[in-house]
Image (spheres, helix red, strand yellow):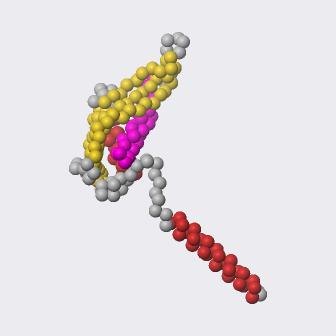
Amino acid sequence: MTKQRIMDNNTSKRSAFLLVLLAFLLFSGCGVSYNFTGGSVDPNVKTISIQPFFNQSGNGPPSMSLQLTEKFKSFYQDNTKLIVVKENGDWQLEGLITKYFIQPISPQANQTAAQSRLTITINASFKDEKNNREFKKDFSFYADYPSTQTLSQIETEKVNTILDQLVFMVFSETTSNW
């Protein structure tokens, strides 16, 4: 090999190394973190206690209270660094399932509804012991389904979808910078 080719080869290797190093520094040095919740948790907050969300609606599947409570615990564990404790957390969350009802929507000419709507409402109470913030608020969400289906056919799926959305709504409220 000629001396020029050796120098060109070394220059190419050096350039490639510098390019990779520069890319690594640019991308690893960024301190920005993105999330889909739109909020954040104060770094001084370390724990959260989540009490059972009892069902006072008089309707719904028997396991709905436990299901909602466990969804809250899982969501906070999966999306924050908070440790779930039994009581006296830095953040405290509790509430009730207050409404569970079905109503017809999309009326048709033959006096029937083309769709039905399952709605669940919860009342959530939140207290941030570290920053002296709190709220008590109703959250409601619904899912529509064809009236040709019975509640027993769709209940498990629709309740799960609604509870997921309610958990996300409460989580967003607790992590927003109000």
Residue plotted at (68% across, 80% down): 11
106 sits to left or right of 97: right
- Comparing 90 with 110, the one in front is 90
Q: Does the magenta portion include 161?
A: yes
Query: Residue 36: within the magenta?
Result: no
Residue 126 lies in quadrant: top left
Q: Is residue 85 visible?
A: no
Residue lying at the far bottom of the rendered structure: 3
Which residue occupies the foreground of this view, 45 or 77?
Answer: 45
Q: Is residue 78 left or right of residue 108?
A: left
**Residue farthest top in this picture:** 110
Count the labels in the image: 0
- List x then y, in percent, for residue 33: 46, 57
Q: Quadrant of the C terminus?
A: top left
Measured as percent of width and height from the top left, residue 123 is found at 31, 35
Q: Residue at image x 75%, y 85%?
A: 4
With respect to residue 29, does 170 lie above or below? above
Residues shaded magenta: 150-178
Please, is residue 35 above or below residue 1 in the view?
Answer: above
As drawn, which residue projects farthest toward the right?
2
Question: Can residue 166 be seen by looking at this rendering?
Answer: yes
Q: Which residue is at 26% across, 48% downward?
A: 132
Most foreground residue, 69 or 33: 33
Residue at left offset 45%, top offset 34%: 157
Q: What kind of secondary structure does the magenta stretch mostly adopt? A: helix
Q: Residue furthest left?
A: 88
Q: Position of residue 15 (x, y in %)?
A: 65, 76
Q: Quadrant of the N terminus?
A: bottom right
* Residue 99 image-quadrant placement: top left
